[in-house]
């Protein structure tokens, strides 16, 4: 794997940033109260998956595409 430029985020950093965005959106929906908790739950689940994928990239320097 080639080295990334210093300002380029690693795949793990990119996946973790996406996870943080999903979790932040879920928190907004929960705080709003009028939005469906089902959507907030979905976003929280997506955040968990993306955080796990970030961990895989950090530990294994890559994760297989399965779908």
Image (spheres, helix red, strand yellow):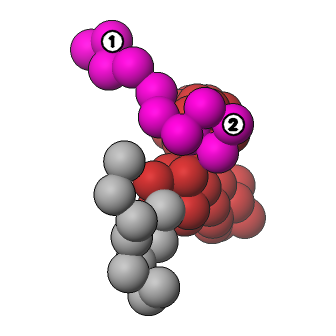
Q: Residues within 10 Å of mark 2 (few under 14, many from 20)?
A: few
- Name of the residue lying farthest toward the bottom: 7
Q: Secondary structure at mark 2?
A: helix
In the picture, measured across the screen, residue 43 lies left or right of residue 3, that is right
User: Residue 51's quadrant in the figure?
Assistant: top right
Q: Tell how many labels.
A: 2
Q: Which secondary structure dominates the residues rendered in magenta? A: loop
User: Residue 54's quadrant in the figure?
Assistant: top right
Q: Is 66 covered by the magenta stretch? A: yes
Decide if residue 17 is in sight here. Answer: yes
Q: Going from the N terminus, do you reach mark 2 or mark 1 first?
A: 2
User: Which residue is more in the foreground, 19 or 44?
Assistant: 19
The Cα–Cα distance between marks 2 and 1, rounded to whole angstroms, is: 18 Å
Q: Is 16 covered by the magenta stretch? A: no
Q: Secondary structure at mark 1?
A: loop
User: Which residue is more in the foreground, 7 or 18?
Assistant: 7
Decide if residue 34 is in sight here. Answer: no
- Name of the residue lying farthest toward the top: 66
Estimate the x, y position of residue 16 in percent, counting from the top left. 59, 55
Residue at 39%, 20% (x, y): give it.
64
In the picture, measured across the screen, residue 31 lies left or right of residue 2, that is right
Q: Are marks 2 and 1 in contact (CB under 8 Å)?
A: no
Classify 33 as above or below 44: below
Classify 54 as above or below 7: above
Q: Which residue is mark 2?
A: 59
Residue at 46%, 27% (x, y): give it.
63
- Name of the residue lying farthest toward the front: 2
Estimate the x, y position of residue 20 in percent, counting from the top left. 62, 61
Q: Which residues are magenta?
A: 57-67
Q: Which residue is mark 1?
A: 66
């Amino acid at each position: 794997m080639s080295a990334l430029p210093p300002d380029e985020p690693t795949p793990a950093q990119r996946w973790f940033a996406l996870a943080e965005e999903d979790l932040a959106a879920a928190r907004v929906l929960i705080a709003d109260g009028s939005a469906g908790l089902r959507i907030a739950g979905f976003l929280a689940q997506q955040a968990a998956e993306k955080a796990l994928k970030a961990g895989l990239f950090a530990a294994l320097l890559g994760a297989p595409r399965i779908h």
